[in-house]
Image (tube, grey):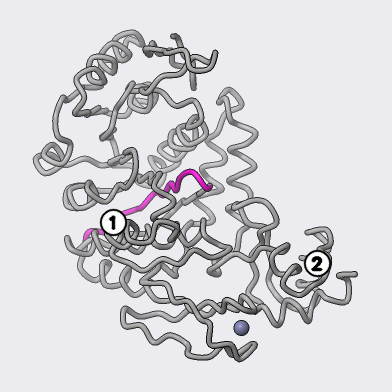
Amino acid sequence: MRVTEGGVELEVPGEQTEGIEESVFYNPRQELNRDLTIATLRAFRKREGRAGSYLDAMAASGIRGVRAAADDWRVTCCDVNEEAVDLARRNLERNGIENASVEHRNVNALMHENMFDVIDLDPYGTPMPFADAAFSRCRDLVCVTATDTAPLCGAHFNSGVRSYGAHPQNTEYHTEMGVRILLSALARSAARFDVGIEPILTHATSHYVRTYLELDRKATAADASLEQLGHLSHCEDCLHRETEFGLVADPLDVCPNCGSERLLVAGPVWLGPYRDREFVTAVREEIPYTFGTAPKARALLETIAAELDEPMYYDQHKLCKNWGLPANAMDEFLADLRAAGYDASESHYGGTTFKSDASVGEIRAATEDNLV
Ligand SMILES: [Zn+2]
């Protein structure tokens, strides 16, 4: 089957599944992720002028590599699967691309032997088996996709503990839990090599987390990254949550809002910002209307740019249900919070989620008069 995406054309072996043609080497649902990757690479090149080489560490059809090479990155595509390697070679040729090579190798070995300015990890499942090699040898930017959202958010608890060396909790903000568990594990991986990370763009759905980490290769930067880690206490009864920085946990014993002792503790989680507002705005400028997901990608970036940094998002319907009150329109709800002097924003996690610096008790006091 033939696929056109972002101005390049690819041939991928197709299979008929329930009348729809699909390919294990090309996932059309990831087009948004790839459009954002290309726009991020464009914005990053303006931020860090020396960046020129790009490793597509799990090439599959080579689509990301082909698109990056068409943007003048010096691309290396790598895959352990021989069929994928042949396919990536053919797709580079088909597009007349000369500034790219294809490696049939274990990518951890390749990364240990070569430096790259940008490394893109897009594995099926957890990226952690590749993180150490990436941080040890990457100069500027590590891009990471994690598709194992059930382990990340605590739904598959033991698997999450094994992969990420952290204690997740499956709460109503499970998607953001996954983001902050992943960033915590990546920060600790980078720190082993005296590398600090700054997440300049992160977005997540219930199917995957994607983050772009700008690196600062010095020990003090690694220390600063680790200082962004901490723990979160969550009350199962009133949904109050509190965070505290530090690798040593000192969780709450009693909920300060309702007195309950039914508290969940998660950590270490990343408590710092997971996007650079100016950079996100710059990425948005790099999305041309010709990209297949342009309207969706731009809207997503606009929401992320405006989203508050506070961990974790609230779910308005879940709060209202807990209070036994009907939910009202989100814009009215947020307006009530702002009128009471709190910061409030929509969140890119969708549905009825929002962010605020107000606590559960403060949110109720600010909004309940209009929940009728
Ligand atoms: Zn409580």
Tag shown at residue 127: none
Q: Residue at x 60, y 91 (%)?
A: 259
**Residue 257 location, quadrant:** bottom right
Q: Is residue 364 left or right of residue 225?
A: right
Question: Hey, what amino acid is under mark 1?
Answer: Ser
Q: Residue at x 48, y 76 (%)?
A: 264
Q: Nearer the viewer, residue 306 or 169?
A: 169
Q: Is residue 309 left or right of residue 316?
A: left
| Rendering quarter of residue 92 | top left
**Element type at marker 2?**
helix
Q: Which quadrant of the figure has residue 124?
A: top left
Q: Nearer the viewer, residue 75 or 85?
A: 85
Residue under label 2: 335
Q: Is mark 2 within 8 Å of ligand 1?
A: no
Looking at the picture, how far across and down is residue 332, in whole percent?
83, 63
Q: Residue at the location (17% across, 48% down)?
A: 133
Q: Please state which of residues 284 and 18 is positioned toward the viewer in this rendering.
A: 18
Question: Where 61 falls versus 128 (above or below)?
Answer: above
Of the numbered discs 1 and 2, the one sitting upstream in the chain is 1
* Residue pointed to by mark 1: 163
Secondary structure mostly seen in the magenta stretch: strand
Q: Amino acid at mark 2?
A: Ala
| Residue interval drawn in magenta | 206-217
Disc 1: CA contacts within 10 A as few (<14), some (14-19) or many (>=20): some
